[in-house]
Amino acid sequence: MVSSAHAVCAKGLYVAMISTTVETKNPEEEIRPAMDLLGQPLEMFVKISEFEVPTDDGKNDKLFVTKSYDATSHFETASEDVLAIYERITGEALDLNIEPSEEDDY
């Protein structure tokens, strides 16, 4: 949840996101336990979208396509997807553990 401390809503209010992978024909009922914890919202928006995946790895035609966003928060799987695409394009994994050299300003 985020609040006025994040400058996204008025003081005393919160913005909450509930996401899931739909498993039934009644997705709003699937999120009922989370809604019960949050209580009655002032406003609620429901968006249901298909999960799409690329049909090819992109190496032959040089067209690299990501998967759709899924139900994870903070874009964990989207970040993993981008790292996988980087590796397919360059042929090597992205090293994010690079130590600064003595010449680097920090």
Image (cartoon, rainbow, N blue to C red):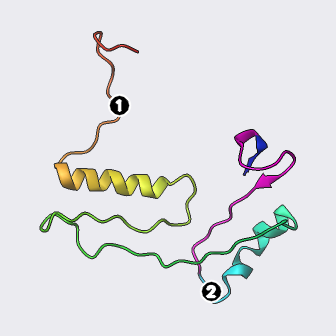
How far across and down, in percent of the image, does residue 74 sit? 55, 52
Contact flag, marks 1 and 2 (Cβ < 8 Å): no
How far across and down, in percent of the image, does residue 57 sit? 22, 67
Cα distance between the residues tagged 1 and 2: 42 Å
Q: Mark 2 or mark 1, which is nearer the start of the sequence?
A: 2
How far across and down, in percent of the image, does residue 46 sit? 67, 75
Membership of 14 in magenta stretch: yes
Magenta region, residue range: 5-22
* Residue type, label 1: Asn
Residue plotted at (80% across, 68% down): 43
Total marks in image = 2
Residue plotted at (87% across, 65% down): 39
* Residue type, label 2: Thr
Dot 2: what SS? loop
Indicate the quadrant where residue 66 lies: bottom left
- Identify the residue under disc 1: 97
Membership of 26 in magenta stretch: no
